[in-house]
Amino acid sequence: MSEPDSLYQKAILDHAKAAVGAGKLEAAQGRATVDNPICGDRVTVEVALGEDGRVTALGHTVRGCVLCAATASVLGADAPGHTPAELRAAAQAFDAMIREGAPTPEGWPGLDAFTPVHEAKSRHECVLLPFEALDKAMADAGEPAEPAA
């Protein structure tokens, strides 16, 4: 299977097509837009947090490639119910999966589809951009990033 074929496999296309969470939230508490000037991808993520600090809703708007849209859709499906700390841990594990070939983050089976991206360094930022936007949106909602260890 060639690189484009393995990158754009059915599971990735299905995630992108599902577009879970696509659109704006009516009661967003945090919002962030990030972009990748190299490829032109732009992602806006909005979050709502419950009294316990867990994400109750996530909305996203993606102007970008199918890989970026697919990752945002996985976040739309799986981020609600998680704490900001859990989401940041998943983001770190996903970054390691993409950049280093580490295992799929535990509890995030939808991210399995992105395993072939590890071999396509030029596409790493595309799949990581929605997680970056989520992190900034949570910070905007008053959930500061964990200090570096």
Image (spheres, helix red, strand yellow):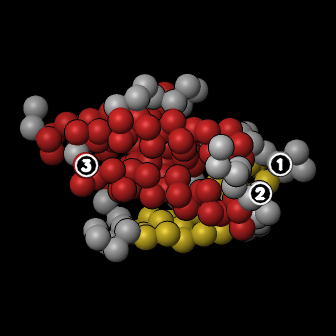
- The answer to whether residue 7 is left or right of residue 19 is left
Q: Amino acid at mark 3?
A: Lys
Q: Quadrant of the rendered structure where residue 107 is?
A: top right
> Which residue carries the number 2 mark?
143
Q: Are marks 3 and 1 in contact (CB under 8 Å)?
A: no
Q: Is residue 95 visible?
A: yes
Give me the residue at 88% from left, 45% from top: 52
> Which residue carries the number 1 mark?
53
Q: Observer-nearest residue: 108 or 37?
A: 37
Give me the residue at 48% from left, 49% from top: 73
Secondary element at image label 1? loop
Q: Position of residue 86 (x, y in %)?
A: 68, 38
Q: How many marks?
A: 3
Q: Are marks 1 and 2 in contact (CB under 8 Å)?
A: yes
Give me the residue at 57% from left, 48% from top: 76
N-terminal of the pair, mark 1 or mark 2, is 1
Secondary element at image label 2? loop
- The answer to whether residue 122 is left or right of residue 86 is left
Residue 75 numbered tag: none
Cα separation, mark 3 vs mark 2, equals 30 Å
Q: Quadrant of the rendered structure where residue 58 is?
A: bottom right
- The answer to whether residue 64 is left or right of residue 142 is left
Q: Amino acid at mark 1?
A: Gly
> Which residue carries the number 3 mark?
121
N-terminal of the pair, mark 3 or mark 1, is 1
